[in-house]
Amino acid sequence: MTVLLEADGVNYRRGGRDLLDGLSLQVSRGQSLAVVGPSGSGKSSLLAVLAGLEPPDDGCVRLDGEPLRVGNLDQRRRLGLVLQGYGLVSLLTAAENVEVALQSRGVIGSAARDESARALAAVGLDDVAGSLLDKLSGGQQQRVAVARAMVTVPDLVLADEPTAELDHDAQDVVMSYLLAATFRDAAVVIATHDPQIAARCDRTMRLHAGRLTES
């Protein structure tokens, strides 16, 4: 399989603390990877570095063999991100939040509305597409964030605890949607503390004290 995402010797420090310490990993096209670890283990920091949101202090992250650059829009458009806190716009509806991701890539009008509707239906939210975000529960907002990340058909999906606020049935729907991306040769990296979520991925790595080990 072709390697899509690679981290090599990554160090990341904040507040005098090594959050990632000499970390290396490879994720191939068509593969899903779960990164497990308790709260505070550095999972969110890892995803931020892998997404190019934060630069590593040492080492390199590569996407398709090219170094990942903070602020590189061409690379950013290839990623689908589900971050803690969701990053959604409270003044917009669920559908409009998803449409924003499409509009940033030049998809507008009825095409954007249709794609947004399909993505929300895929996470079981077609009945609240027109609801303002602040009228939705935390779990519903989480699913909107997943729909927004996936609607652009990204090459690489990076999801930080994407099922944390969901019941069992909703977890199953969201995980099936995320992992379906591997069937079109995308790569999926999911940070989770839930061993049942991790078990659905092709591989699992454990993050502890800033270091990754294969499980």
Image: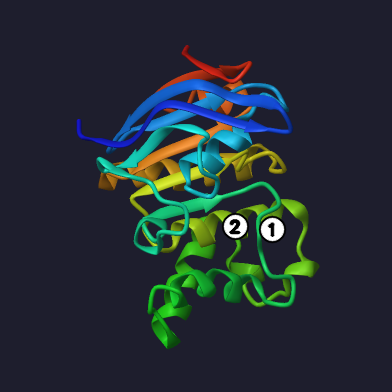
Say the numbered circle drawn on residue 145.
2
Instruction: Quickly name the residue at label 1.
Output: 141
Residue 181 to residue 124: above or below: above
Query: Do the residues bearing badges 1 and 2 touch, measured as CB atoms within 8 Å?
Result: yes
Q: Position of residue 167 (x, y in %)?
A: 70, 40
Q: Position of residue 44 (x, y in %)?
A: 62, 37
Q: CA distance from mark 1 to mark 2?
A: 6 Å
Residue 5 to residue 141: above or below: above
Q: Residue furthest left?
A: 1
> Which quadrant of the view contains residue 124?
bottom right
Callout 2: 10 Å neighbours few (<14), some, many (20+)?
many
Q: Of helix, strand and loop, which one carries label 1? A: helix
14 to the left or right of 152: right
For image coordinates 68% across by 70% down, the residue present is 89
Residue 190 to residue 210: above or below: below
Q: Quadrant of the N terminus?
A: top left
Q: Of helix, strand and loop, which one carries label 2? A: helix
Q: Residue furthest bottom?
A: 109
For image coordinates 60% across by 71% down, the residue present is 97
Question: Amino acid under label 1?
Answer: Gln
Question: Amino acid under label 2?
Answer: Ala
Residue 101 to residue 165: above or below: below
For image coordinates 52% across by 34% down, the residue present is 57
Callout 1: 10 Å neighbours few (<14), some, many (20+)?
many
Q: Position of residue 157 (x, y in %)?
A: 44, 46
